[in-house]
Amino acid sequence: MVGDRVEDVAAAPGLLSPERAEALLEALPNGFALLDADWRFTWVNAASARLAGSTREAMVGSVVWDVLPGSRGSAVEGAWRTAMAQQRETVVEVHASVDPPLWLEVRAWPDGDGLATSTTDVTARHLDREAAERSSRRNGLLTRSGAELGGAVGVREASERLAHLVVPALADWCVVSEVEGDDQLLRGAVRTAGWWHRDSRRLPLVARLALETSAVVDQPRASTPDGAQAAAREVFQPLLQGRPVVLTRGAADVMAAAVTDPGARAAIAQLDPSSLVVVPLRGRYGLVGLLSCYTDQGRPAPDAEDVALITDLARRGGLAVESARLRDEQQRLGEALQRSLLTAPPLLPGCEVAVRYVPAAHSAHVGGDWYDAFAQPAGPVLVVGDVVGHDSRAAADMGQVRGILRGLGVADDTPPAELLARVDTAMASLGVETTATAVVARLEREAQHLTTGGAVLRWCSAGHLPPLAVEPGGPARVLPGRSGLLLGMEQLTGGSVRNEHVAELAPGSTVLLCTDGLVERRGTALDAGLEQLRAALEAFRDLPLQQLCDAVVRRLLPAHPEDDVALLAVRLRPA
C-alpha cells in the first residue's frame, strides 16, 4: 500500500480509496516514491523504478543512497535534505548520465515524518531550451561577425577578429591562415595571419605553433613522407576540394604527424587538442585562407550544428579577409605611388634635413601632402604643400603642382614669393584644375653668416601654416607673417600679391615646416594646435634631428590620424 497518509486521505468522506489512489499513482508517467525518516523507500511506482534503472522489489525497503549511489553528495541529496529539514517543497533539475542522456526534474515535499518525491523526464523541455540558447548564440555570433569583420583594417586584423569570434564560443583555440588561391594551398604556401586561445597563458604555445609551421597541408620538401605523415595529409585532402575537415578525436596525433617542424610538434604536444575542425575561407574570387578550430581535452567535440556555424562564420570571414587583402594591395600601391612622388631629400650645403610622411588612417596611404627641398644659388629651398583631397586624384594633382614648383625653382634664383606667383601662372596656363596650399622658404647666408653658421630664412606662404623655428637652448617660435591666397586661385582672382617675410636664425637653429594634419583637430582651434606643436618643438629641441621628428609626430598625432601629414625639418650646421 502507498502508506498510512494515503489511507487517511482516502478514508475522508468523498475522497479516493487507498486502492484507487495507488492505481492512479502507478499510472503516472513520471516517477513517484515515498521515503521514511531513515531514507528508505516505502513505496515506488513502476516509472520511478524504470528511471532508477532498478525494480520495485529491489527498491522498497532499501536506503535511497544504496539504490541510487550517484545521488550521494549531489544536488538531489541536497534538495531532499532541505525539504526534510525545512518542511517545504524543493525542485532541482539534474542530468542523468545514461544512454541516451536524460534531464530529470526532481521534486520533493514533506510527507509526515518522511518524504514524497516526484521525478519527471524533462529532456524534451531541456533540449528545446538548449536549442533556443544555441539559436540565440548563433544569431548573436552572426550579428557580431557582421559588425566586427566589416570594420577590420588589413588581413591581420580581420583574421584576429575572426579568431576572437570563434574562441571561446565554438572552440578553445584557433589559428587563421592566409592562402592565395587553391594552387597555393596545393603547394602548401600557407602563412599564419591570426590566432587566439581562451587561456592567455597558453597563447605563446599557439603562437609557436602558428609561426613555426606553414600549414598542416604542407607538402614534403625532400624525402617521401613516412606512413604517419602520408596518413595525416590524406586526412586534410578534403580541403583541396573546398570541404571542411572534422576530427572528433585524436587531433593531437594527426597534427603531430602532419607537421615536420620540431618546435611545432612540441607545441602540439603541450596544447594536446582533442578535436579539430578546419574550414576553408573563401571570398568572391576563390580561396583566401583556412580557419582551424581546436577543442581541448574535456570539452565535447563540435557537433553538426557547431560545424555549420563555424562554416558560416568562415564564409563571412573569407569575404572579410578578401576585402582586407584588396585594401592592403591598394595601400601598397598607394605607398609605392607616394614614394615615387616624395623623393628622398637631397644633401644641402650647411644643413641637415629630415622628412616624415604619415598617411591618413582611412585613406589608401596616398594623398595630396608633399615636401621638397632643392638648392638654388642663393641657398637651399624648402617646400611643404597640401593639395585638396586624400586619394589617388589628390596624389596625381600633387605630383603636377610639385613638379611645376620644383621645375621653376631649380631653373634660376627665383625668391619664394616670385616662385609661388610663377607657379600660379603655370597652373592656369597648363589647366591644372586644383587648389593647394604651400609654403616656400629659402635659407640665405650672407657674409656675416659664413663665419658663424647662422642664416636668414626668407619665406612666403600660399594659404599654408607658417614655419616654426627654435634656437639651441632658446624658446621655439611660430614665425609671424601674412599668408596669401591658395595656389590655383589665379584663374579666379587674376593674380594675387605674394608677401615675403624674413627671420634671422642663430647657428644650430632648427626650422620645421608641416601640413595642417599635424596640428588641426576637429573641434579644436588651429591656434591651439600650433601652440602644441611649438611646445613640442621646444621640448625636443636638443634631440638629434631624426629623433626630434619622431618625437614630435608621436606627441601630436593620434593612433589613427584623420588627415595626411608631411613634415620637413632642417637644422643649420655650425660654420
Image (spheres, rainbow, N blue to C red):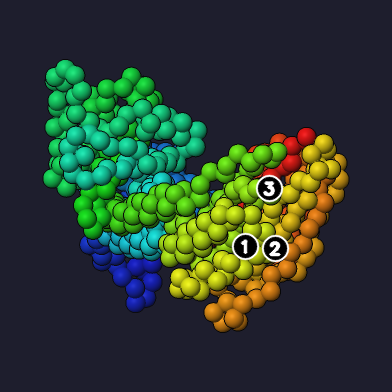
Residue 529 seen in render: no
Residue at the image point whose x is 82% and y is 36% from the top:
451
Q: Is residue 465 left or right of residue 481?
A: left
Q: Quadrant of residue 8?
A: bottom left
Give the distance between the C-alpha atoms of the residues marked 1 and 3, in whole angstroms. 14 Å
Residue at the image point whose x is 78% and y is 51% from the top:
456
Which amino acid, mark 2? Cys
List the residue tagged with mark 3.
379
List the residue tagged with mark 1.
419
- Nearer the observer, 352 or 395: 352
Give the distance between the C-alpha atoms of the residues marked 2 and 3, in whole angstroms. 15 Å
Residue at the image point whose x is 38% and y is 71% from the top:
12
Location of residue 251 with respect to 388 vertically, above or below = above
Q: Residues within 10 Å of mark 1 (few under 14, many from 20)?
A: some
Question: x, y (%) of residue 298?
Answer: 35, 36
Q: Secondary structure at mark 3?
A: strand
Query: Of the residues under marks 2 and 3, which one precedes in the sequence?
Result: 3
Q: Nearer the viewer, mark 1 or mark 2?
A: 1
List the residue tagged with mark 2.
460
Q: Quadrant of the C terminus?
A: top right
Give the distance between the C-alpha atoms of the residues marked 1 and 2, in whole angstroms. 9 Å
Query: Of the residues under marks 1 and 2, which one precedes in the sequence?
Result: 1
Question: x, y (%) of residue 149?
Answer: 39, 57
Question: x, y (%) of residue 216?
Answer: 25, 32
Location of residue 301 with respect to 558 vertically, above or below = above
- Nearer the observer, 241 or 274: 241
